[in-house]
Image (cartoon, grey):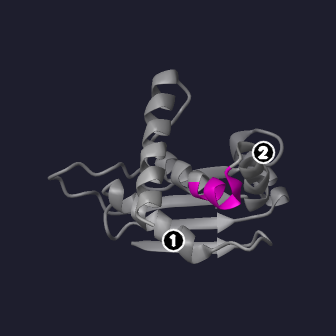
Amino acid sequence: MTIEILDESGHDLDVTHLAELSRFVMDAMRVHPQAELCIKAVDEDTIAQLNEQWMEKEGPTDVLAFPMDELRPGLVDTEPEEGVLGDLVLCPAVAVRQGETAGHGTLAEIELLTVHGILHLLGYDHAEPEEHREMFGLQDELLARWRAGR
């Protein structure tokens, strides 16, 4: 897997940790070993501009996902599809506030946003109650497995 992480956020982001987490999630979801992912950490102004441009929403957000080749999770006994998973844009400044509010800190919030974003890239959504249960259940399961293995 190719995982590129660009930190333009001005925060002290542990890019190695982020790459390891991303690889773990992509492996767990049976994404093709040659798949590509780019994660870009940006400041609030940049993510606010992207949020308005692409989502037609005002203000900064925590994570944006831009799927490329519409890859889906691989199935057991089936060869996963090769391609570019897509791009994630994270905003650590928003993650700091959300981590404090949630009571689990910045690193846990960045982990959560990374897993959440990768699931979006794999076609998961949470607009409907059933989708929400499925996506957030899977997100919680992946985070628990990641943290148990650390």
User: Which of the 4 image quarters holds residue 89?
Assistant: bottom right
**Amino acid residing under circle 1:** Ala
Mark 1 or mark 2, which is nearer to you?
Answer: 1
Give the left or right position of residue 122, taking residue 117 as reference. Answer: left
Which residue corresponds to mark 2? 52
Q: Quick check: is 150 in the magenta stretch?
A: no
**Amino acid residing under circle 2:** Glu
Residue at image coords 42%, 58%: 148
Please provide percent x and percent y for residue 47. 76, 55
Give the left or right position of residue 79, taking residue 148 as reference. Answer: left
Which residue corresponds to mark 1? 19
Q: Around disc 2, counting alpha carbons within 10 Å, would you say few (fewer than 14), some (14 to 19), or many (20 or more)?
A: some
Please provide percent x and percent y for residue 115. 52, 53
**Proximity of marks 1 and 2: CB atoms separated by less than 8 Å:** no
Which quarter of the image is occupied by the N terminus?
bottom left
- Labelled disc at residue 87: none
| Residue closest to the far left | 77
Please provide percent x and percent y for residue 25. 42, 58
* Residue 74 drawn above or below residue 128: below
Residue at image coords 29%, 57%: 81
Which quarter of the image is occupied by the C terminus?
bottom left
Q: Which residues are magenta?
A: 104-111
Give the left or right position of residue 15, taking residue 11 as reference. Answer: left
